[in-house]
Image (cartoon, rainbow, N blue to C red):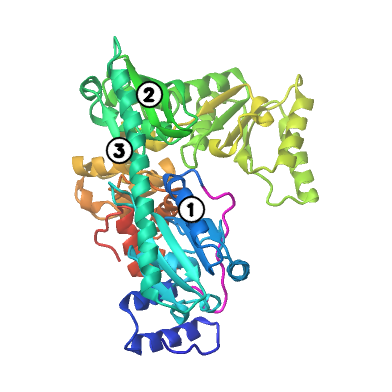
Amino acid sequence: MPRHQPGSSLQAARELYLEVTRDPSARPLVVASWQRSMEHRVKSGSLDAPYLDDPNLDSPLARAALPILARLHEQLADDPVATMITDRNGVVLSRKVSHDGLTTNLNRVQLAPGHVFAERYVGTNGIGTALASGRPVMIAGMEHYVEALRDFHCAAVPILHPTRRTLLGAFNLTTVRQGSGGMLMAFARSVAAQIEGEIAAITSRRERALFHDYMAACSSVRPGPVLAINRDVVMMNEQLGAAVTGPDHYALLDHAREIADSPRSEGTRSIALPSGRVAELRVSRCRREDSDAGAVLRVRLIGRPQPGPAASAAPARTDPGLVGSAPQWLRAVADSRAAFVAGTSLQLLGEAGVGKRTLVEALHRAHGAGRRLETAQPPPSDSPAVTERWLHDVGELLAVPSNVLVLRDVHLLGDPLRQRLGNLLTQLEGTATAQLVLTGQPSTVGADDRLGRLCGVLVEVPPLRHRHGDIERLARFFLRRYRPSGESRISPDALTMLQRCPWPENVRQFESVMRGLARRPAGPVIQAEDLPPECRVSSHKVLTTIETLERDAILRGLMDHDSNVQRTAQDLGISRATMYRKMRRYGIVPSNLT
């Protein structure tokens, strides 16, 4: 490889890249990685590996790899070699080093547990390039994109799931010795194969344990419908397959996956299905050797399927602007209406965009005659002067009994301000005050939240992905709103695609899509190819938290930029080619995009 010329700017990296591409000894894999590094706008003169506190050491990969790394550490005693295991995002989960000098050097470049060594952050390196390319790689010295890493020689091998062959992470060997790269790579391949073999054994034991509990549930005196599920497998008996079909089937699986992904989910819970029936789930965890193998759900169906379109008419007439007949939505509307009419304080919890504000405004139009609807948002800063003024304004609004005061996004309030607001509400108890409505997101509000307990009624507003049956009704509603003079229908294929979309921004995003479709010149029937790319999510793979955030960022970007891939890619700081790769990875199917 050519010698590096001083300089840390992107221009210096481009100049060195041109030298790399002209070097006859340059490997195509390294050249491609450098190109990706420049697309990610990585700075070659500075190293910035993000840090994630408390990396997940309870994953199947970590459980399989850590004992092997511990044995390997003993064998490599006093050798200046570091062994590491990372997850699929490049987060270093574990590092073993026997040589103090090497430990100091690794810490200097942040190559330590918790730091992320994906290409998008640190450019070409063993870990990131192995993960990005899906191939074993040897990155030596000047092949590293960032200057600070060029003292190291790294051999990294991707680790794949033994049956699904999906990427789990990588094994990495790092040294400062210039020796045989072939020997280092052979060693890394051998260790990675051992880790994959151990994962296969663990997976087999895990799935056998889940199968054992599933068979026990099916063999009981009165088994009924039974479902067993984890991240890798889904098992269901004939009774469940026959009893739950169509949209109910997909809705049940969606809920079951969320339950299986949470090791604390156990006991009995009820889920409203799109047909109007209720599925009562008795959840048992399958635990073996201090690990969770999934969940076995015994299912009891309550009620009969309800006729479709007519069900939404009643709430729409009672509370104008509210559309939907999904049981979870109807329950949220009914509980909110009862609290509102009674003048009871109300807390609405739900993901962003589910319709909390729309629900309150509709209730006020229908049942708030003579009362003024006031809204307050969290203060723009935590400075004492600003928060003091905010509390004063809230107190004045609460002092008017004819007001309905909506405090929006209370999950954004800091703990001190939440405490002070709670004290204010406590002081006002027993006096004539405005009716209080709090709105917030459930994932950020703790179960012991004092502010929430001060409200008389708590209502959870369901996300759109749990309202399969309402997609068609909402589509008709928004098309009539934004194309009042035209008659538009949605083809079955397009409707299916809309129902399968994850809708990270919920009804807010759905309305934006329908508004765009209504304003485009199109025929009377909206076909699947007319839908924007954010609706073309066909992948059902289980995503990590980081992947989910990245997918949702892409979907939001496409929504904000009217499906323009180039502008979305520019906003995200990636190239158009990278954007298309990520869209394919997440099942966002491109159509005629710009």
In the image, residue 218 sits, relative to residue 574, either above or below, namely above
Residue 37 appears left or right of 99: left
- Between label 2 and label 3, give the one nearer the viewer: 2
- Tell me how far mark 2 sits from mark 3, CA to CA: 23 Å
Mark 2 or 3, nearer chain start? 2
Task: Name the residue that disc number 1 marks.
Answer: 71
Crowding near the residue tagged with mark 1, few <14, some 14–19, many ≥20 C-alpha atoms within 10 Å: few
Image spot of residue 348 (x, y percent): 55, 31
Q: Which image quarter: residue 251? A: top left
Q: Amino acid at mark 3?
A: Arg
Q: Nearer the viewer, residue 373 or 358?
A: 358
| Mark 1 secondary-structure assignment | helix
Mark 3 vs mark 1: give the one in front: 1
Between residues 515 and 226, which one lies in front from this camera angle? 226
Query: Of callouts 1 and 2, which one flags the residue occurring earlier in the amino acid sequence?
Result: 1
Residue extent of the magenta highlight: 42-56
Q: Is residue 493 visible?
A: yes
CA gap between label 1 and label 2 equals 51 Å
Tally of numbered tags:
3
* Residue 330 against residue 87 in the figure, above or below: above
Q: Position of residue 357 (x, y in %)?
A: 52, 37
Tell me: residue 229, above or below residue 510: above
Residue assigned mark 2? 272
Q: Mark 3 Cα within 10 Å, few/some/many (few <14, many 20+)?
A: some
Three-letter amino acid code of the residue under disc 1: Arg
Residue 476's mark? 3
| Residue at the spot 29% in from the left edge and 9% down from the top edge | 221
